[in-house]
Amino acid sequence: MSTPFPYSSDPFPPKPPHSLLGIASFVIALLSGCAVACFVGAAIVLDDDGSTLDTVFCALFFLFWMSEIVALAMGIAAIFQVGYDKTFAIMGVVISSLVFFGILIIAIIGLLS
């Protein structure tokens, strides 16, 4: 009995498992990106009257924006892990960096106008 691959019993080597840091980076980037998008949409609708709601709103926006930095750091750490699949890590880095720098650009444009 001849096998098509004489040096291996399995023609397809097993794929490495996904990095848990990469999965966490992707999930945090996705959830906080959606939350930031909702806060930006709500900021367009709300008027600025200096109430306590505005203060809480800004604090939550800042918290979710900083969670993008955490997702970015976790994604970069997951990219450098050896022996794991890097798919979720790369997606987490891309999403978190797009949201972080997008909000930064929107904030700079808002300050300049």
Image (spheres, grey):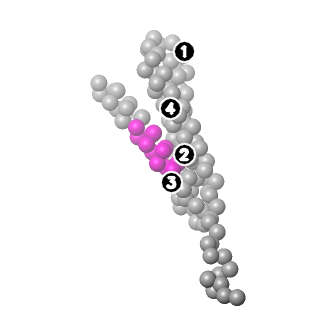
Q: Tag 2: Cα neighbours inside 10 Å, few (<14), some, or many (≥20)?
A: many
Is label 4 or label 2 in front? 4
Q: Earlier in the sequence, mark 1 or mark 3?
A: 1
Q: Tag 4: Cα neighbours inside 10 Å, few (<14), some, or many (≥20)?
A: many
Secondary element at image label 4: helix
Residue found at x 51% / y 12%:
51
Q: Tag 1: Cα neighbours inside 10 Å, few (<14), some, or many (≥20)?
A: few
**Nearest the eye: 39 or 53:** 39
Q: Hey, which residue is sitting farthest right in the picture? A: 1
Q: Provide the residue designation for mark 3.
A: 90
Q: Tag 3: Cα neighbours inside 10 Å, few (<14), some, or many (≥20)?
A: many
* Badge 4 amino acid: Val
The region drawn magenta spans 91-102
Secondary element at image label 3: helix
Secondary element at image label 2: helix
Report, in whole angstroms, how far the alpha carbon at label 4 lies from the one at label 2: 14 Å
Report, in whole angstroms, how far the alpha carbon at label 2 lies from the one at label 1: 29 Å
* Badge 1 amino acid: Thr
Check residue 52 in the rendering and tell me which mark sits there, or answer none.
1
Tag 4–tag 2 contact (CB < 8 Å): no
In the picture, the quarter occupied by the N terminus is bottom right
Check residue 71 in the rendering and tell me which mark sits there, or answer none.
2
Q: Earlier in the sequence, mark 3 or mark 4?
A: 4
Tag 1–tag 3 contact (CB < 8 Å): no
Q: Earlier in the sequence, mark 4 or mark 2?
A: 4
Report, in whole angstroms, how far the alpha carbon at label 3 lies from the one at label 4: 20 Å
Check residue 36 in the rendering and tell me which mark sits there, or answer none.
4
